[in-house]
Image: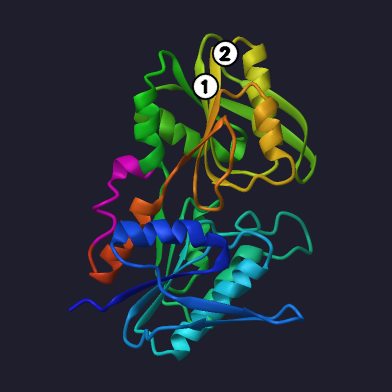
Amino acid sequence: MAAIVNIFSGDTSLYLAKNIAKVYGKELGNVKISHFKDGEYQPSYEETIRGNDVFLVQSTNPPADNLFELLLLIDAAKRASAKRVVALIPYFGFARQDRKDRPRVSIAAKLIANLLVAAGVDRIITMDLHSDQIQGFVDVPVDHMYASSIFVPYLQALNLPNLTMASPDTGGTKRAAAYAKFLDTDLVICFKQRKKANEVSSLRIIGDVKDKDIIIVDDIIDTAGTITKAANMMMDEGASSVRAVCTHPVFSDDAIGKIEKSALTEVFVTDTIRRVASGKITILSTAEIFADVINRVNKNKSISTHFGFTTML
């Protein structure tokens, strides 16, 4: 017999958590987060969770308070005798720090994995990790969802006459190539060089974009510098239109303003981090995916059979 399910949320993912709970068919759990004058905070569950499967919805995008709040929620659930504590992390923050790319730097993604396990998490559910290898950093099961199961049907419904997939950099080539293979389209790659983080020094387009309807595929849009510069260059080189799909809308600084002023026709994002107001941005919900995964985890059913190979791009 499956355990009773409780779904709770930290402050940063409250909107998505409410939608997940609604799709799942139950009320979002009652958790109170008390804030003290010195900046400390303390979560407490205002209902019993003893012997239950507890799912905690919280993205760990900066500030670090979001991550620490999740760690406290995990610890409190373990101490309240939950049967299983599952961290549902739509956006796994610090995932870009997944290796030592130069001397004397931390591997933040591994550190966060260690912290989650130390806090007592039994399982992690997440979506479109920046690097697949992060799954191996964690010593508990990781259910890695793919936003392609949302984006692919949407792209097919657009019925663009000369659809061509594009990667905003060489690191994202595998992801864009998978979309191109599944949708049977050509592939274009942007080759960029940086002087420092969040600042592109040069960008070149590799491939033919003339008269093509380009879809740039990425997992994260941070400052939107690369994706808007690429879109403008593609239009200058004769593209019919340029759109973008992105799982995690970080949108730092004036990212939305850059998108509004760019040649991009539309940007499709999910609700893993935040909801944004922009005429060029379309938000596609992940609530149905996560609600179904919660149900399957609770009943010990297969997840891989539900998310077939064709959607694991």
Q: Are marks 1 and 2 in contact (CB under 8 Å)?
A: yes
Q: Which residues are magenta?
A: 302-313
Indicate the quadrant where residue 34 lies. bottom right
What residue occupies the far left of the structure in this picture? Answer: 1
Say what amino acid the circle numbered 2 marks: Ala
Instruction: Specify whether 290 is left or right of 277.
Output: left
> Residue at horizontal 38%, vertical 41%?
150
| Nearer to me, 244 or 45 | 45
> Residue at horizontal 46%, vertical 56%?
16
Which residue bears the numbered disc 1? 214
> Residue at horizontal 55%, vertical 70%?
113
The percent coordinates of residue 57 (x first, y second) are: 47, 65
The percent coordinates of residue 96 (x first, y second) are: 63, 54
Q: Residues within 10 Å of mark 1 (few under 14, many from 20)?
A: many
Dominant SS of magenta comes to: loop
The percent coordinates of residue 63 (x first, y second) are: 69, 63
Q: In the image, which disc is placed on residue 239?
A: 2
Q: Is residue 162 above or below residue 305?
A: above
The percent coordinates of residue 277 (x first, y second) are: 59, 40
Label 2 element class: loop
Whether residue 309 is in magenta: the answer is yes
Say what amino acid the circle numbered 1 marks: Ile
Q: Is residue 51 above or below residue 126?
A: below
Label 1 element class: strand
- Of labels 1 and 2, earlier in sequence is 1
